[in-house]
């Protein structure tokens, strides 16, 4: 009798398990991430972010003019400073340079004769060169930069949409 009862329970368990597998999926959740050896974790919103620079009037960019700067934040969390000497971090931004605005990140799209300039502490960021070190504390920290659209010094600015991409690398000291 005990064997029949155990067999019946096992059969019911297998049927219940197969029923949940047979249900159709309504969506998908994909998890992404990476593990690195740095002193801090980077918050997900900072790893891949979009900064809206706005809809800028052509006349504002003419003759080397620029748009208003927008904040670019890299948020760090869980910083452990035990292996650091100076408790600082530098940030290196890389990307395709502009062919019309020296020092700027190049853009793609229908807008023309513009580039994206980045700043740190009010000073221009040089692509491929580490920024000045920023002091960090244990726990959470925010690294702040600026970005604005810069027009070419000669020629007419071409209206249209644009986009640009820069990558960043953090180096802890």
Image: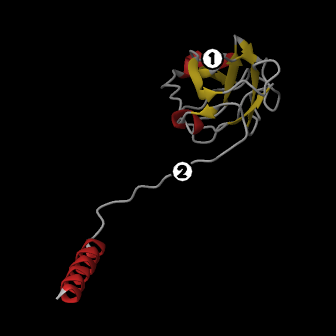
Is residue 38 left or right of 2 when viewed as pictured? right
Q: Residue at x 38, y 59 (%)?
A: 28
Say which mark, if any, is on residue 66.
Answer: 1
Q: Residue at x 51, y 34 (%)?
A: 45
- Measure the alpha-carbon separation of dots 2 and 1: 36 Å
Q: Judging from the image, what secondary structure is the residue with disc 1 in?
A: loop
If the image is split into quadrants, where does the N terminus sit?
Answer: bottom left
Residue 81 drawn at (x, y percent):
72, 24
The answer to which of 90 and 99 lies nearer the viewer is: 90
Q: Residue at x 68, y 23 (%)?
A: 118
Residue 6 drawn at (x, y percent):
23, 82
Quarter-wise, where is residue 138 in the image?
A: top right
Quarter-wise, where is residue 116 in the image?
A: top right
Give above or below for 119 relative to 128: above
Q: Earlier in the sequence, mark 2 or mark 1?
A: 2
Say which mark, if any, is on residue 32.
Answer: 2
């Amino acid at each position: 009798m005990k064997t029949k009862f155990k067999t019946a329970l096992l059969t019911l368990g297998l049927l219940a398990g197969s029923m949940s597998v047979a249900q159709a999926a309504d969506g998908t959740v994909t998890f992404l991430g990476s593990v690195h050896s740095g002193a801090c974790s980077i918050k997900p919103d900072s790893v891949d972010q979009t900064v809206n620079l706005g809809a800028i009037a052509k006349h504002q960019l003419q003759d080397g003019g620029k748009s208003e700067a927008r904040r670019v934040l890299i948020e760090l969390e869980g910083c452990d400073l035990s292996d650091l000497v100076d408790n600082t971090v530098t940030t290196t931004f890389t990307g395709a340079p502009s062919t019309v605005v020296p020092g700027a990140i190049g853009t793609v799209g229908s807008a023309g004769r513009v580039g994206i300039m980045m700043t740190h502490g009010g000073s221009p960021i040089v692509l491929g060169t580490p920024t000045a070190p920023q002091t960090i504390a244990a726990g959470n920290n925010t690294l702040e930069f600026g970005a604005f659209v810069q027009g070419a010094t000669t020629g007419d600015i071409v209206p249209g949409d644009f986009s640009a991409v820069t990558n960043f690398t953090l180096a802890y000291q």
